[in-house]
Image (cartoon, rainbow, N blue to C red):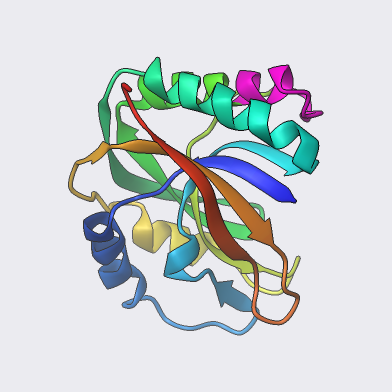
Amino acid sequence: MRLFAAVLPPAGAVGELRGVVQGLPAAPGVRWTAESGWHYTLAFMGEVGEDLLPDLLARLARAAARTEPFTLRVHGSGHFGDRALWVGAAGGLDALRMLAERADAAARRAGVPMEQHHRYTPHLTLARAKEGAADLRPYAEALAGFEGGPWPVRELSLVRSDLDPVGGPRYDVVGAWPIGG
């Protein structure tokens, strides 16, 4: 199964962001992500065998328990070339980065072959475009000043991603653990 560790924003943060995104103009070649899939990925694990799951779940539970509670807010925006539009985060970024490090380490120690380690950049993907199909800069500029309200990060989630070429990815939470135990 295709898995990643994530922080899921609460309904209030999703509602704030929805209000801003709904005001953006439609554009050919831009596919907006479903609100149900909005998340801050901490560690992408890719395909994980069922045999590794029990150890991975236990290690992620410990990672969440060892992390001090913190708050985030949706803040700013950017784009990855002409392929993805995203919003960032502000607030407890040091704690979020630490949680990302712990999730990555938990996966590695459970035997999940992880990609090469790189500095964590928090982002929530709002839209995707086929390469060269759309200019995402105007969207990033329109969202640049967005500042959502603060919300407490309450849990670390392990999410399963099933790719559907027609409807986009579908996400299901496999497990969730409270931050700070």
Give the image quarter of residue 5: top right
Quadrant location, the C terminus: top left
Q: Nearer the viewer, residue 177 or 40?
A: 177
- In the rendered view, does 6 fall on the left or right side of 155? right
* Tag count: 0
- In the rendered view, does 83 fall on the left or right side of 176? right
The relative height of residue 33 versus residue 2 in the rendered view (above or below) is below
Q: Position of residue 153 (x, y in %)?
A: 30, 36
- In the rendered view, does 15 fall on the left or right side of 64? left
The relative height of residue 11 versus residue 75 in the rendered view (above or below) is below
Residue 82 in view here: no
Q: Position of residue 139 (x, y in %)?
A: 45, 65
**Residue in the image at 63% along x and 53% along y:** 160
Q: Does the magenta segment cover residue 133?
A: no
User: Where does the magenta region start and end?
Assistant: 104-117
**Residue in the image at 81% along x and 28% along y:** 113
Give the image quarter of residue 131: bottom right
**Residue in the image at 42% along x and 81% along y:** 25
Q: Nearer the viewer, residue 71 or 178?
A: 178
Q: Position of residue 11 (x, y in %)?
A: 26, 60
